Amino acid sequence: MPKFNYNQLIAQFQDFRQKIYNCFESCSDACMNLLDALAGNTEANSIAELSLSPLFPRSYNSIYKAISESFNTNCQDTNNKVEETEEQKEPNNLIRVISELIDQPQQRHFYLFATDTTPHPRPYAKTLAERGYIYQPNTIKGNKPINIGHSYSILSILPEKETGNAAPWSIPISGERVSLDKSGVEVGSEQIKALMCDSSLHWQEKLCVLVADTAYSHGV
């Protein structure tokens, strides 16, 4: 079995957490607690339920405040910026932190990315903003493959396996909700374009390959 330097791994993890912490412009402590609660309780049925996690030592209203203030800060910054060219756009700090952990491919001569949309059904959330018809596969013959809710476009990087028997990794680096006036292909194309135009990422000048299903085989 391979030997691990646990002190080095702990130091690397602490450094990673600090960099993630620095990405939040507001309510950083509550946001980190929320991430810990999410990682430790994947079966939670609501946001409020995460406040019961021992990893979230705050009241439930801190969750909503952290999400609301962080989102509002990002929206205000975007709305106040003058329209920029691709070269002038500020790098996404969160993606940059994640990219630092991706080793350069050794067995292949390119970075491998994958993109697709995933449905998030919310058929009973009548007050949910921009809820609409979404595609969702249905195993019952004759039923239409639709539901009501949101769809999300996920762009991931697929790093090489360390060994032949190792489980494959799919690391999400960008997630965007598909609005009602756009398609998953359009949102996915925007995510790819933003990623490839970010000069702060170390794969920007390397060969990059994207895998996707046939829906992405035509121009936008």
Image (cartoon, grey):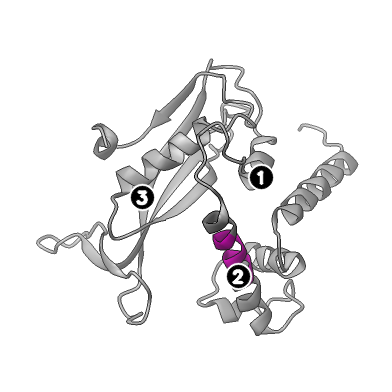
Relative to residue 46, is residue 156 depicted above or below? above
First-in-chain label (3 vs 2) = 2
- Label 3 sits on a secondary structure element that is strand
Give the residue type at disc 3.
Thr
What residue sits 57% from the left and 28% below the top? 160
> Which residue is disc 1 drawn over?
93
Label number found at residue 39: none
- What residue is disc 3 on? 117
What x and y, as percent, mark residue 150? Answer: 35, 64
Q: Position of residue 188 (x, y in %)?
A: 38, 43
User: Which comes sooner in the sequence, label 1 or label 2?
Assistant: 2
Q: Nearer the viewer, residue 11 or 154?
A: 154
**Distance between the Cα atoms at labels 3 and 1?**
23 Å
Q: Nearer the viewer, mark 3 or mark 1?
A: 1
Q: Residue furthest front?
A: 82
Residue under pointer 2? 67
| Foreground of the two, 71 or 149 | 71
Find numbered disc 2 in the image and state the secondary structure of the residue it sits on: helix
User: As shown in the figure, which amino acid type bears the numbered disc 1?
Assistant: Asn
Residue 93 drawn above or below residue 147: above
- Span colored in magenta: 69-76
Task: Using the numbered discs, state the Cα–Cα distance from disc 3 to disc 2 in whole angstroms.
Answer: 23 Å
Above or below, 209 against 76 in this view is: above
Do callouts 3 and 1 mark residues in contact (Cβ within 8 Å)?
no
Location of residue 177 (image quadrant): bottom left
Seen as rendered, the residue at the extreme right is 7
Q: Secondary structure at mark 1?
A: helix
Q: Position of residue 125 (x, y in %)?
A: 36, 79
Q: Is residue 141 left or right of residue 72?
A: left
Majority secondary structure in the magenta region: helix
At x 72% / y 68%, what residue is drawn? 27
